[in-house]
C-alpha cells in the first residue's frame, strides 16, 4: 500500500511528457518524392544557426535517398516568384503556390530554438533545439511535425567538465533524430 | 631498455622536422629541361589578394617570376602585359576572360597565363602562408591546365627542442613559391601526375553525402564553378574554398573545370544575381553559355585560421553539383573539420593551417564525386529509408 502511495506521489511530481511527433494518419507519405525546404526561423542568439541547421538538414534528407530536395537557390527563386512575404512561415495559400512552382509534393519549414553553449555554474556544453514541420502541397496543411533537442549538460559534464560535444556533432545528432522520426 | 626506447622516440619525433612543410610535391630539377619545350612564354598576372589584409603581393609575384625564369620559361614583360590589358580595357586580373586570353595569345605570343592567389600571409610568430596558382591556356578555348596550392605554418614541423620552427615569414614564402613552381614545372614536363591525387585521410571525408546513381564515374564532365556563398567571418572564404575544390577536381582525369574568369564574365553578361544559391534557370543559363555539364555551388559556414600558436583551424562548408541535362542535384555533401580532430598525443596528426585542412577536405569531396560507390548514398536513413504510408 505504501509502495503504491509512493509510486502515485512520484508520478504526480513527474513532468508531463508530450509526444514530439505529429503525423497525419490520413496522409500517404509514400506519394511524397520531392520536397522544398524553406529558410528556417532563427530564435537563437547565433545569427548563422538557421543556415547551418538547414544546410545539415537538407544534406541529411538527400543522403537518405528516399526524398529529393529542391536546391536552395531554386527555392529562393520560387519564394521570390510566389511573392511570399515571410518565407519562414508561409500561409497555406503560399505553400500551394510555391509547391506548384517547385514541382514539390511537400514543403518543409523549421525553427531553431536553441543553438550554442549553455552554462550551469562552472560547467558548459553545446545544445541545439530544433523543430520542423511538413506542409502538404495541395492544401498547405500540416501533415508532420517533429522536434529534437540534443546536447546540453549531462552528469559526466557536471562531474568531469570537458565542455560537451562539438556543435557540429550535436547538430548532426539532432538532424538524424528528426529524419528518423520522419521515416519511423 | 628504457634508454634505446627514448632514443628511438626522439628520432621519430625529429623526423617531422626533416619533411617539407608544404603539401605540394617538389619535383626534380631535371624536369625543368623538359618543361622548356612544353611552354615557351607565360604571362604572370598580378597576385590576387584573398587574405583580406595588406600583403607583399609584389614580392610573391617577383619570386614566382624568378623561379619560372630560372626553370627556363619565358615570362611576358610587365609593360607588354599592361599594353594588351589596356588595349582590351581589362581591369579584372584574378581570372581571365575568353577574349583577353585570345588576345594575349595572338598579340603577345603568350602560350599560357599563370594566375596566382594569396590566401593568407601572417608575419606574426608562427608565420603562415597559403598560396594558389593556376595555369590557363590561351587561344580559342582557354582551359585550366594546372592548379595547385600550398599552405604552411612556421610550426608545422617543430622537431626536437623547436629546432625545426620557422620564424621568418620571408623564408616560408620562398619555400611556398619553390613548391608551387616545382609543381608547375613538373606538371608541364609531364613528369608527375596531377597535383592533389593522393588519397585523403578518413577524418577529412565529408560528414554527410548524397551521390545520385546518375553520376557516372566513367563519364567525362566539365564543371563550371560559381562563387560560393560566404557566411563565415573570413573575407573571401567563398573564393578560397572554390579554389580548393577546383584544384582537386582538375586532378581527376575525367573532370575538367571551366576557367572561373569565363564563368564570371557570363554571370555579368546575363546579370545573374544569386540571393540564396544557384537556381535551375541560372544553372541552365551558365552551363549553356560556357558549354559545361555540371555547375558547382555551395556555401562556406566557417573558415578560420588559428588565432595563435595554440588554436586550431576550423573549416565548415557544403557543396552541390547540379546537372544541366537532368536539372537535378547529382551530388551534395557537408564537410566540417577542426585542425585538432583525432589528435590525442603530442599533436600527432595536427593540421596547423586552414589551407592545408581545406585542401584535404576538398580532395575527399573530389574523390567522392569521381569514384563509383556501391550504393548511391553513403548513409541511408533508418529502416528502409522509405517514407511510411
Image (cartoon, coloured by chain):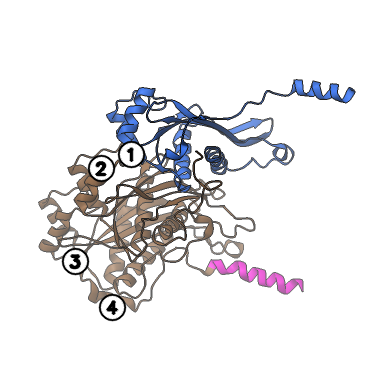
**Highlighted magenta segment, given as a residue range:** B1-17
- x, y (%) of residue B194? 36, 67
Kindly identify which chain the residue marked by label 2 belongs to: B
Closer mark to the observer between disc 3 and disc 2: 2
Q: Earlier in the sequence, mark 4 or mark 3?
A: 4
Q: Nearer the viewer, residue A22 or B4?
A: A22
Q: Earlier in the sequence, mark 3 or mark 2?
A: 3
**Residue A138 position (above or below residue B267):** above
Q: Is residue B14 magenta?
A: yes
- x, y (%) of residue B353? 48, 53
Is the same chain shared between marks 1 and 4?
no
Gap between marks 1 and 4, in whole Å? Answer: 47 Å
Residue at 25% x, 42% y is B282
Q: Is residue B384 magenta?
A: no
Gap between marks 3 and 1, in whole Å? Answer: 38 Å
Chain letter for the brown part: B
Residue that badge 1 annotates: A73
- x, y (%) of residue B337? 51, 50
- x, y (%) of residue B368? 43, 58
Residue at 38% x, 59% y is B248
| Mark drawn on residue B282 | 2
Q: Secondary structure at mark 1?
A: helix
| Mark drawn on residue B34 | 4
Q: Is residue A10 left or right of residue A173?
A: right
Closer mark to the observer between disc 1 and disc 4: 1
Q: Nearer the viewer, residue B236 or B248?
A: B248
| Mark drawn on residue B111 | 3
Amino acid at each position: 500500500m505504501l509502495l503504491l502511495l509512493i509510486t502515485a506521489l512520484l508520478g504526480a511530481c513527474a513532468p508531463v511528457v508530450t509526444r514530439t511527433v505529429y503525423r497525419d494518419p490520413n496522409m500517404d507519405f509514400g506519394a511524397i518524392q520531392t520536397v522544398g525546404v524553406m529558410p528556417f526561423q532563427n530564435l537563437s542568439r547565433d545569427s548563422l544557426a538557421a543556415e547551418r541547421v538547414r544546410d545539415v538538414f537538407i544534406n541529411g534528407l538527400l543522403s537518405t535517398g528516399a526524398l529529393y530536395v529542391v536546391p536552395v537557390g531554386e527555392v529562393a527563386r520560387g519564394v521570390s516568384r510566389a511573392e511570399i512575404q515571410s518565407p519562414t512561415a508561409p500561409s497555406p495559400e503560399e505553400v500551394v503556390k510555391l509547391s506548384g512552382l517547385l514541382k514539390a509534393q511537400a514543403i518543409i519549414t523549421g525553427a531553431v530554438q536553441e543553438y550554442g553553449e549553455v552554462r550551469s555554474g562552472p560547467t558548459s556544453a553545446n545544445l541545439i533545439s530544433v523543430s520542423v514541420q511538413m506542409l502538404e502541397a495541395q492544401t498547405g496543411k500540416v501533415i508532420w511535425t517533429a522536434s529534437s533537442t540534443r546536447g546540453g549538460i549531462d552528469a559526466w559534464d557536471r562531474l568531469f567538465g570537458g565542455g560537451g560535444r562539438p556543435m557540429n556533432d550535436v547538430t548532426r545528432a539532432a538532424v538524424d533524430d528528426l529524419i528518423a522520426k520522419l521515416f519511423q | 631498455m628504457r634508454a634505446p626506447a627514448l632514443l628511438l622516440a626522439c628520432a621519430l619525433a625529429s623526423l617531422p622536422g626533416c619533411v617539407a612543410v608544404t603539401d605540394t610535391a617538389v619535383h626534380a630539377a631535371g624536369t625543368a629541361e623538359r618543361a622548356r619545350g612544353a611552354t615557351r612564354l607565360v604571362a604572370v598576372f598580378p597576385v590576387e589578394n584573398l587574405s583580406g589584409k595588406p600583403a607583399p603581393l609584389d614580392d610573391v609575384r617577383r619570386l614566382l617570376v624568378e623561379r619560372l625564369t630560372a626553370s627556363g620559361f619565358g615570362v611576358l614583360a610587365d609593360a607588354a602585359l599592361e599594353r594588351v590589358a589596356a588595349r582590351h580595357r581589362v581591369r579584372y586580373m584574378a581570372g581571365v576572360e575568353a577574349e583577353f586570353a585570345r588576345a594575349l595569345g595572338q598579340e603577345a605570343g603568350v602560350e599560357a597565363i599563370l594566375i596566382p592567389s594569396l590566401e593568407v600571409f601572417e608575419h606574426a610568430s608562427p608565420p603562415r602562408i597559403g598560396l594558389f596558382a593556376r595555369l590557363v591556356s590561351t587561344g580559342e578555348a582557354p582551359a585550366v591546365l594546372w592548379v595547385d596550392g600550398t599552405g604552411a605554418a612556421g610550426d608545422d614541423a617543430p622537431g626536437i627542442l623547436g629546432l625545426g620552427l620557422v620564424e621568418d615569414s620571408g623564408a616560408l614564402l620562398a619555400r611556398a613559391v619553390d613548391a608551387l613552381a616545382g609543381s608547375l614545372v613538373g606538371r608541364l614536363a609531364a613528369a608527375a601526375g596531377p597535383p592533389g591525387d593522393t588519397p585523403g585521410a578518413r577524418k577529412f571525408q565529408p560528414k554527410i553525402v548524397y551521390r545520385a546513381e546518375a553520376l557516372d564515374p566513367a563519364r567525362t564532365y566539365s564543371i563550371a564553378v560559381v562563387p560560393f556563398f560566404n557566411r563565415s567571418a573570413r573575407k573571401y572564404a567563398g573564393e578560397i574554398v572554390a579554389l580548393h575544390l577546383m584544384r582537386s577536381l582538375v586532378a581527376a582525369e575525367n573532370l575538367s573545370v571551366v576557367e572561373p574568369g569565363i564563368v564570371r564574365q557570363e554571370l555579368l553578361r546575363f546579370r545573374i544575381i544569386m540571393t540564396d544559391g544557384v537556381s535551375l534557370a541560372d544553372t541552365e543559363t551558365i552551363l549553356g553559355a560556357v558549354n559545361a555539364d555540371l555547375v558547382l555551388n555551395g556555401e562556406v559556414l566557417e573558415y578560420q585560421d588559428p588565432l595563435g600558436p595554440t588554436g586550431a583551424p576550423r573549416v565548415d562548408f557544403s557543396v552541390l553539383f547540379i546537372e544541366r541535362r537532368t536539372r537535378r542535384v547529382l551530388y551534395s555533401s557537408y564537410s566540417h573539420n577542426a585542425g585538432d580532430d583525432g589528435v590525442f598525443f603530442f599533436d600527432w596528426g595536427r593540421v596547423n593551417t586552414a589551407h592545408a585542412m581545406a585542401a584535404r577536405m576538398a580532395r575527399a569531396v573530389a574523390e567522392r564525386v569521381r569514384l563509383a560507390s556501391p550504393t548511391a548514398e553513403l548513409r541511408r536513413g533508418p529502416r528502409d529509408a522509405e517514407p511510411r504510408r
